[in-house]
Image (tube, rainbow, N blue to C red):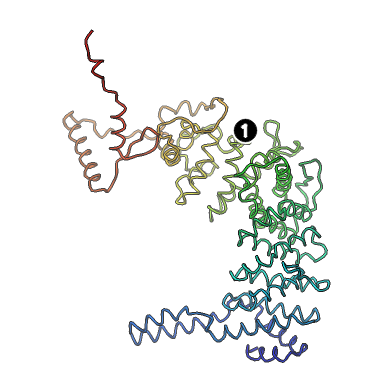
């Protein structure tokens, strides 16, 4: 259907004719996500061809600026904006649900185009969409009657598209305090049974977008609207939990997978909770908040122990769970180990390690995927690192799994398929965050003991973290750990004298390059090497470095100066004879 034709029909005001025309429009554009993209590409190609023919510099400048010109001047954009405004005007009338639904479907399709959002991003339009979605705004405008669930769901989709694509709409949503209306919907119906599952999903999706894009809204939900409590109740209702104890949920490990629609809703709740708790781990919490976060942690433990309908969905579900767990105060994560050890559970030191085992398996799968490691791997690495610092049993269990007593001393630490090998490889990753997280995790498992860390990783791989920590000269980190001794295998003890500390393995003995040389020849080669280093240094190709008093790398001349200052020269009184 031509846009001009649809405009004329909308202006006619005949509800039945409009509904029929919109049905045709919606069917034709149902899969359209980039309006007029092909037309814009065709115009670019035509202008490029003209440029090649004319070869005129001034024309190139005009083409370059026109190729991505102001879309508000595009006649088709103007036409879509006009249709959008006519649709909003039509929706303000007293319509049958079928007419509302087909009109909202058209708005949803048009709201995908970020260049024609002006009619939907105004205060009046957002208010209309909120009313149809069953959300009360700041001006007290809510649904006139009981909202049809399909109409509400479609209106929420329109709001999601508009808020996501328009900064103006984001500002208006904040002014209308839509987050308060959404929170009220959750409070009245935590399980989402009244409005339908689709409606609840898009309410949560809109809440996620608002908290992700607007700092003030995030703060308002967290503090004024008691968002953590509200969303924890919503999460509990979506999962249909049964409690065995204060912080223990009944979990059937071999039970049926979580249904797809329930998984979708749960993941949205987890994402919203992540947005409003991102600073929780960095601040002190009182007893009341600690109890709340322990309650939430117990639910998240349940989330890690269950699966969705496919491995891919389970990984995504567990990923959001891990992200949120990393936000919670460390003191509240003790509930992850609290449940009693049951037959089939992973036990260590009398503690239930099911959750830690799943986190370890989750990390291993992310390591094998190797995609977007900064986003997918660092949260679980940080969680395991900080948990190991805080909980001795967790650290000892992880060390037994990741850094078992060393037996393989023939291969480099980064060569192989064990967890240790994979993590050591990451210690030289191009992404700074990834390599820092991997190194920090292994360092904590070694109880921040430099010699033990070097033993498992090799000095070459460990140098980056040691330099950053000022531990190149050896010693320990700042963490407080027990003084138990490391247990070496017989294989390691036998090979230890021949292990190269830089590579972390036994190297084949190479022939001595100075064998057969006289002392004069050796001195000549040594001075030649010094001269080459000096030349490279003076030409600023390399910069010789040394380890300073603080254990960190610094230019060699400054290191020598520090050493000279430390040498105490005798005073005149010391020189006097008795």
Q: Quadrant of the N terminus?
A: bottom right
Pick whichever, 242 or 208, lies toward us.
Answer: 208
Pick whichever, 577 or 392, lies toward us.
Answer: 577
Q: Residue at x 65, y 47 (%)?
A: 325
Residue 120 falls in image quadrant: bottom right
In this view, 188 is above or below 525 = below
In this view, 236 is above or below 74 = above
Q: Residue at x 44, y 86 (%)?
A: 46
Q: Position of residue 157 (x, y in %)?
A: 69, 70
Q: Position of residue 250 (x, y in %)?
A: 79, 45
Q: Quadrant of the C terminus?
A: top left
Name of the residue lying farthest toward the top: 578
Circle 1: is it few (<14), some (14-19), or many (20+) Cα within 10 Å? few
Pick whichever, 99 or 495, lies toward us.
Answer: 99
Location of mark 1 (residue): 392
In this view, 246 is above or below 210 = above
Pick whichever, 532 or 8, lies toward us.
Answer: 8
- Circle 1 SS class: helix
Q: Position of residue 228 (x, y in %)?
A: 71, 51
């Amino acid at each position: 259907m031509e846009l001009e034709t649809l405009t004329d029909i909308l202006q006619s005001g005949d509800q039945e004719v409009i509904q029929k025309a919109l049905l045709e429009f919606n069917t034709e554009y149902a899969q359209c996500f980039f309006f007029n993209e092909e037309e814009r590409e065709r115009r670019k190609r035509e202008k490029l061809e003209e440029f090649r023919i004319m070869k005129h510099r001034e024309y190139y400048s005009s083409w370059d600026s026109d190729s991505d010109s102001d879309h508000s001047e595009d006649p088709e954009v103007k036409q879509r904006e006009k249709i959008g405004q006519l649709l909003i005007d039509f929706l303000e009338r007293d319509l049958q649900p079928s007419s509302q639904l087909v009109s909202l479907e058209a708005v949803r399709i048009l709201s995908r185009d970020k260049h024609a959002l002006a009619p939907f991003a105004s205060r009046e339009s957002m208010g209309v969409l909120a009313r149809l979605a069953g959300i009360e705004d700041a001006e007290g405008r809510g649904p006139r009657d009981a909202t049809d669930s399909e109409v509400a769901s479609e209106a929420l989709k329109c709001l999601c598209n508009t808020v996501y694509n328009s900064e103006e709409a984001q500002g208006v949503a904040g002014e209308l305090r839509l987050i308060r209306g959404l929170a009220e919907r959750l409070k009245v119906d935590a399980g989402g049974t009244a409005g339908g599952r689709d409606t609840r999903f898009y309410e949560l999706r809109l809440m996620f977008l608002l908290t992700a894009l607007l700092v003030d809204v995030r703060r308002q939900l967290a503090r004024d609207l008691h968002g953590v409590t509200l969303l924890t109740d919503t999460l509990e209702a979506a999962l249909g939990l049964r409690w065995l104890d204060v912080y223990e949920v009944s979990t059937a490990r071999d039970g049926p997978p979580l249904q797809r629609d329930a998984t979708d809703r749960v993941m949205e709740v987890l994402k919203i909770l992540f947005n409003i708790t991102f600073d929780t781990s960095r601040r002190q919490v009182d007893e009341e908040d600690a109890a709340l976060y322990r309650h939430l942690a117990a639910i998240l433990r349940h989330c890690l122990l269950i699966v969705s309908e496919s491995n891919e969905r389970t990984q995504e579900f567990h990923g959001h769970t891990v992200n949120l767990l990393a936000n919670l105060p460390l003191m509240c994560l003790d509930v992850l180990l609290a449940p009693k050890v049951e037959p089939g559970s992973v036990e260590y030191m009398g503690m239930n390690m099911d959750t830690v085992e799943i986190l370890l398996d989750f990390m291993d799968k992310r390591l094998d995927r190797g995609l977007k490691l900064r986003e997918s791997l660092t949260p679980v690495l940080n969680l395991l690192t900080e948990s190991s610092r805080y909980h001795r049993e967790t650290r000892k269990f992880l060390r037994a799994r990741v850094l078992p007593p060393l037996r393989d001393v023939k291969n480099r630490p980064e060569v192989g398929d064990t967890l240790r090998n994979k993590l050591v490889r990451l210690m030289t990753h191009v992404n700074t965050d990834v390599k820092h997280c991997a190194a920090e995790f292994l360092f904590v498992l070694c109880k921040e003991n430099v010699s033990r860390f070097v033993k498992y990783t090799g000095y070459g791989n460990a140098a980056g973290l040691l330099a950053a920590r000022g531990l190149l000269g050896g010693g320990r980190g700042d963490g407080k750990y027990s003084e138990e001794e490391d247990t070496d295998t017989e294989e390691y003890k036998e090979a230890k004298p021949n292990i190269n500390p830089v590579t972390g393995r036994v190297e084949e003995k190479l022939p001595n390059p100075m064998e057969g040389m006289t002392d004069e020849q050796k001195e000549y080669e040594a001075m030649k090497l010094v001269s080459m280093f000096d030349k490279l240094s003076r030409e600023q190709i390399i910069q010789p470095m040394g380890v300073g008093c603080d254990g960190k790398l610094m230019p060699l001349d400054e290191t020598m100066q520090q050493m000279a200052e430390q040498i105490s020269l005798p005073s005149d009184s010391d020189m006097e004879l008795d």
